[in-house]
Image (cartoon, helix red, strand yellow):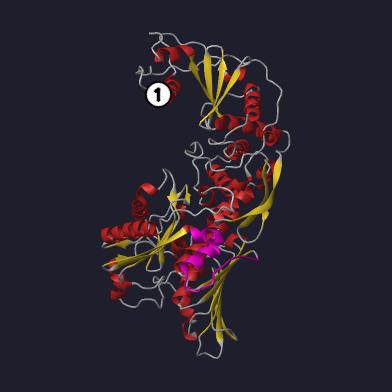
Amino acid sequence: MNHRITVLDETVYKRIAAGEVVVNPAAVVKELMENSMDAGATAITVEISQGGKELVRVTDNGAGIVAEDVPLAIQKHATSKISTLDDLDKIGTLGFRGEALSSIAAVSRLTIQTRTADSPEGAVLTVSGEHGPEISSAGLAEGTTVKVENLFYNIPARMKFLKNTSRETVNVTSVVSKLIFANPHISIKYISNGKIVYHSPGNGSLRDAIVAVYGKDIAHKLAKADQASGEVRIHGLVSQPTFLYKSTNYMSFFLNGRYVQSKNLQAAVLRGYGERLLRGHYPFSILHIDIPLNRADVNVHPSKLQVMLYNETDVLDAVETAVSKALEENSTPPVLSFAETGTAEEKNPVRPEPAAEPEGPDEFPALRSAEKIYQPKPRAAQTPNYVMPPREKPNVFQPTQDFGALIDSVAKYNEPEEEQEMLEDVRRLLDYRIIGQVWNTYVIVECADCLYLIDQHAAHERINFERMKKAAAEGGAAAQGLLVPYIATLPAEDFSLLVKNAELLQSLGFDLEEFGPLTLKFSALPAQVEKSTAEKLVEEVLFELRNTKDDILLQRDAVIRASCRYSIKAGYQLSDEQIEELMREITGLEAIPNCPHGRPIAVALKKSDLQKGFKRIV
């Protein structure tokens, strides 16, 4: 090691500095698109190949670069955005450091083609990490095209840390979508490997910009937010409380047109929703924050994603108020047409918690016939007794308490006096008598000195889970075709995740195929799934895949759990034949008597507990 201090060679420190600005292809796309926007472009085309590692090309119809200034474009800290120290206090452009093109030129093969409106011909600059710039003249259209090839070709160590092509494509797609939301007045076309992914209209409508990215189905699920308070104005769109996600990835903020990240802004939006949000769920929101330029410092980090607000409390209060008012003004009850099937919940879906049981009326009123729901199975061999775990003793009932409360309380605690008795496993019931169904939720079965209350939804989830698991192990689960295919336009990350797991999904009964940019067509679902639940099921599958380790067996079981969630629900009135078939299925189970999410299938209510409740014995 040389302990003497020396000045690094220019080629070395340029590459080191470039790493602060250019960390991946997405960063290149962001910097080039922002340059186009600063140049006043009204139309921008972004093209990438192999996730941007092989090619990034950004073309705009902006002001262009004066021919004499083209060599300066790739020099460090050369910029047209600012000129004095005072300009740092009121930055109104997206770029201002003069680092982007210089950094990109140090780690790639760069070509710039540009012409201004008053110039008869354009200029072409080519440069790479080891070769100086070469400039020539050419006949060009007004505007600028920047082509970046072979990113990090001269820094193998950095290239090794790039993600796979799919992941880098998702990163670029995310950047482009954010800039579409930030600039609805600019028409942006995004092409990946020759396919058009997005093409925003550029008509100034934020709603139309969102539709260009997420599809037309999202349009009616959004509420308009617009709030002015002093120097602060908040405007944008937030989702109705019935349209939620299970992560904060769908909350975007733009400060004076610049995409920024802030936990405090996210918290302000959540406060605006208040008790309207389900626990663990987050809204979709795209909010623009307009404040005086001198009230924010964007010169915090080269990525320019973090900002410092000088009046942050006022901004957060304005965001909270804007969201709250938007939801109040759009809190009309859902309209149900008699010509439609399904309930309001189906038309305004909420992303469900995997382990939670829906409350209230069932979401799917049309119950399929018993022969379609149940497939008789041979009765399993005898299994060991199931010992109910000890719990706290129930409170003593007063004679005035009703029978429904008695059943609820005893079923909840179900504790014998001194010694835990051996209760018969619900799977072993042979000489039983079906009493009936209560509250369209529980089946009551009498066997010896016990009443068994069976949760019809939990039981059928377990039955379907075992059936699908067995079918998948044997080579493929049964599928049911959809009369009208379900078309899903998805965020880039979700689209990539489903495509990556397409083979697994197909083995479980899903029939899906690409149907345009970031769009999948589902022509069939697993046979056990209610057809009208396609949208919710896809969201549930995505949630399970995101939160499951990259293990094929774990992912298989996770997708099956998601599918089984849409079995018989609480709220279905079962016929006598359906109840009998359900009991035959339960008593034939080999698996543990719990649903796939861990809830018990049945609880036992002993005759002695009833007698104690009615004071027949003490």
Q: Identify whether 264 is placed above or below 373.
A: below
Q: Residue, x 52% and y 66% (percent of image)?
A: 29
Q: Quick one: label 1, few (<14), some, or many (20+) residues within 10 Å?
A: few
Q: In which quarter of the image is residue 217?
A: bottom right
Q: Quadrant of residue 396?
A: top left
Q: Residue, x 61% and y 24% (percent of image)?
A: 591
Magenta residue check for 197? yes
- Give 267 or 92, whichever is nearer the viewer: 267
Quarter of the figure with the C terminus: top left
Residue type at mark 1 is Asp
The total of numbered circles placed on residues is 1
Q: In this view, does 399 lie to the left or right of 494?
A: left
Query: Residue 345: percent from the left, percent from the top?
Result: 51, 48
Query: Residue 116: percent from the left, percent from the top?
Result: 50, 85
Q: Is residue 575 left or right of residue 213?
A: right
Magenta region: which residues? 194-220
Mark 1 residue element: loop
Q: Name the residue under label 1.
A: 402
Q: Residue, x 56% and y 47% (percent of image)?
A: 536
Q: In this view, does 82 lie to the left or right of 120?
A: left
Decide if residue 159 is in sight here: no
Query: Residue 333: percent from the left, percent from the top?
Result: 44, 53
Magenta residue check for 576? no
Q: Residue, x 37% and y 54% (percent of image)?
A: 266
Query: Residue 383: percent from the left, percent from the top?
Result: 62, 16
